[in-house]
Image (cartoon, rainbow, N blue to C red):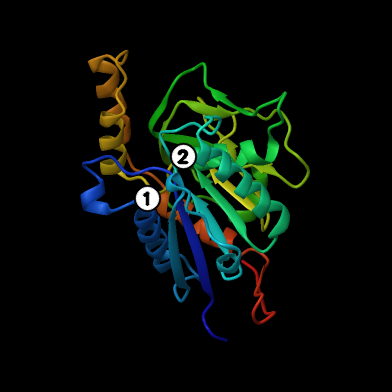
């Protein structure tokens, strides 16, 4: 059997801060590096082959109908924007996500931070009941532990890179908006919660996976981002404490391995009809 091949399209929703961009490229480049690295380190995925394509969604770039025929999964990156902003590109991206979910059941949706919020806004918000808002508790910054739900652990297993707390996933964070969903629609599950944020992502088998945190961020990326995003009301001590929280071990490779296993869930090739399940 030939190695499985994934075609993933990354929708860039922002540009990394100036100190990061020349060293690591766009968020689409950073995600590609992360996922290739995770495949090489994840049992059963070392022979996985990739095709990556990227689109600048801020400029209105989105996959065409013809391109969608060859795409297995979409990755919606983080952004300094808010999922509820009235910018035309955000509205277009929101409608695009709705269309993918309704009309393209073979294409899986993944979102990180802003991407998590935009997917939830697209799928769950109503005009009278938006699900994305400013978090009254303020920012969640640095590496923070997520207590994973039993459902998520049963599907993807314990966090092997965190042997002392295998039910906790440690990720980098930089966000001030959150998704509030007291109950999830049928088939959707919470991935877990942190002390700061009650919904750290959603998962629906073979369709949707989101992370409020940033598996694609490391110490350098998040530290530089937090310094660039500093708000006038942040004291020097608050900034120092936040940067100290950034300088900690995380479970990004494990989380990226989960992304890959999700993209392969109930994967049925539209070209060969063969099934792959992880």
Q: Position of residue 130 (x, y in %)?
A: 66, 27
* Label placed on residue 80: none
Mark 1 / mark 2, whichever is N-terminal: 1
Question: Residue at (53%, 59%) from the top-left corner?
Answer: 63
Dots 1 and 2: beta carbons under 8 Å? Answer: no
Dot 1 crowding, Cα within 10 Å, few <14, some 14–19, many 20+? many
Left or right: 267 as drawn, with respect to 26: right
Q: Position of residue 27 (x, y in %)?
A: 37, 50
Left or right: 129 as drawn, with respect to 222: right
Q: Quadrant of the C terminus?
A: bottom right
Q: Quadrant of the N terminus?
A: bottom right
Question: 195 or 51: nearer the eye?
Answer: 51
Q: Position of residue 227 (x, y in %)?
A: 26, 29
Left or right: 187 as drawn, with respect to 64: right
* Label placed on residue 27: 1
* Label placed on residue 213: 2
Q: Quadrant of residue 274?
A: bottom right
Q: In this picture, is 35 found above or below 27?
A: below
Q: Quadrant of residue 120?
A: top right
Q: CA distance from mark 1 to mark 2?
A: 14 Å
Q: In this picture, is 232 found above or below 255?
A: above
Q: Position of residue 172 (x, y in %)?
A: 39, 39
Q: Total of numbered circles in the picture?
A: 2
Q: Which element is circle 2 on?
A: loop
Q: Quadrant of residue 193?
A: top right
Q: Which mark's residue is nearer the viewer, 1 or 2?
A: 1
Q: Which element is circle 1 on?
A: helix
From where the camera sits, is residue 212 visible? Answer: no
Question: Residue at (50%, 53%) from the top-left corner?
Answer: 75
């Amino acid at each position: 059997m030939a190695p499985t091949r994934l075609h993933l399209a990354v929708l860039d929703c922002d540009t990394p801060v100036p100190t990061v961009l020349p060293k690591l490229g766009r968020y689409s480049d950073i995600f590609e590096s992360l996922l290739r690295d995770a495949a090489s380190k994840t049992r059963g995925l070392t022979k996985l082959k990739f095709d990556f394509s990227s689109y600048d969604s801020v400029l209105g770039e989105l996959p065409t109908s013809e391109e969608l025929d060859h795409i297995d999964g979409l990755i919606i990156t983080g952004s300094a924007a808010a999922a509820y902003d009235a910018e035309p590109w955000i509205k277009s991206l929101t409608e695009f996500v709705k269309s993918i979910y309704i009309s393209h059941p073979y294409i899986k949706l993944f979102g990180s931070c802003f991407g998590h919020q935009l997917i939830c806004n697209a799928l769950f918000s109503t005009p009278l009941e938006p699900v994305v808002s400013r978090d009254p508790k303020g920012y969640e910054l640095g590496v923070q532990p997520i207590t994973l739900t039993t459902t998520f652990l049963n599907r993807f297993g314990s966090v092997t890179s965190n042997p002392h707390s295998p039910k906790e996933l440690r990720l980098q964070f930089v966000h001030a908006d959150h998704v509030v969903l007291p109950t999830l629609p049928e088939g959707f599950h919470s991935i877990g919660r942190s002390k700061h944020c009650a919904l750290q992502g959603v998962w629906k088998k073979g369709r949707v996976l989101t992370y409020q945190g940033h598996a694609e961020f490391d110490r350098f990326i998040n530290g530089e981002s937090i310094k660039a995003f500093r708000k006038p009301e942040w004291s020097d001590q608050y900034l120092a404490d936040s940067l100290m929280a950034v300088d900690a071990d995380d479970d990004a490779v494990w989380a990226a391995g989960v992304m890959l296993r999700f993209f392969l869930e109930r994967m049925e090739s539209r070209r060969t009809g063969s099934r792959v399940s992880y």
